[in-house]
Structures are given as C-alpha cells and as structure tokens.
Image (cartoon, rainbow, N blue to C red):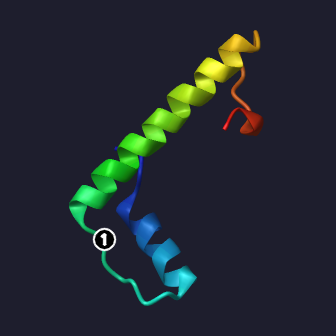
Amino acid sequence: MLVVRVQVKEILKEAGLGVDNISSDFLERLDEEVKAMIIRSVNRAKENSRRTVMARDL
C-alpha cells in the first residue's frame, strides 16, 4: 500500500472540515488512484524520451 492512513488522517485534521474518520475502502481506492497516477506519469515521461518522472508529468 502506498497511502499511509496516519498521513491521510493528518490531512483531514489540518483541513478542519469536521471529517475525522476514513473507511478502509476509501484508502484502498485512494491507493489505486495513486498507482494509476504514477503509471500515467511514467508513461508520459517515456513518451517524452525521459527516464526521469517529473511533476509536470502529473
């Protein structure tokens, strides 16, 4: 798993929106989304003949 529950909870707390809990299925889905973002970014870097993934690839 790429996403760390404690870090996500810290983001929720910092946001101050009154949402304090995270379901396990949310974390699983978030992890899938992060993995997909990484794959898309790697593909974009490769399409641009780079071996380094950069912020602009997001």
Up the image or down, 50 lies above or below 16; here it is above
For the point 69% across and 12% down, the residue is 47
For the point 23% across and 57% down, the residue is 25
In the picture, the quarter occupied by the C terminus is: top right
Residue 8 occupies quadrant: bottom left
Image x and y of residue 5, in percent:
36, 63
Image x and y of residue 35, in percent:
44, 36
Image x and y of residue 18, in percent:
43, 90
Q: How many neighbours does mark 1 have within 10 angstroms: few (below 14), some (14-19), or many (20 or more)?
A: few
Q: Nearer the viewer, residue 31 or 40?
A: 40
Q: Residue furthest top?
A: 49
Left or right for 35, reference 20 = right
Q: How many marks?
A: 1
Up the image or down, 24 lies above or below 33; here it is below
For the point 40% across and 57% down, the residue is 4
Residue position for label 1:
22
Left or right for 49, reference 33 = right
Q: Residue furthest left?
A: 24
Amino acid carrying mark 1 in the image:
Ile
Left or right for 42, reference 52 = left
Tag 1's secondary structure? loop
For the point 51% across and 27% down, the residue is 39
Up the image or down, 43 lies above or below 4; here it is above
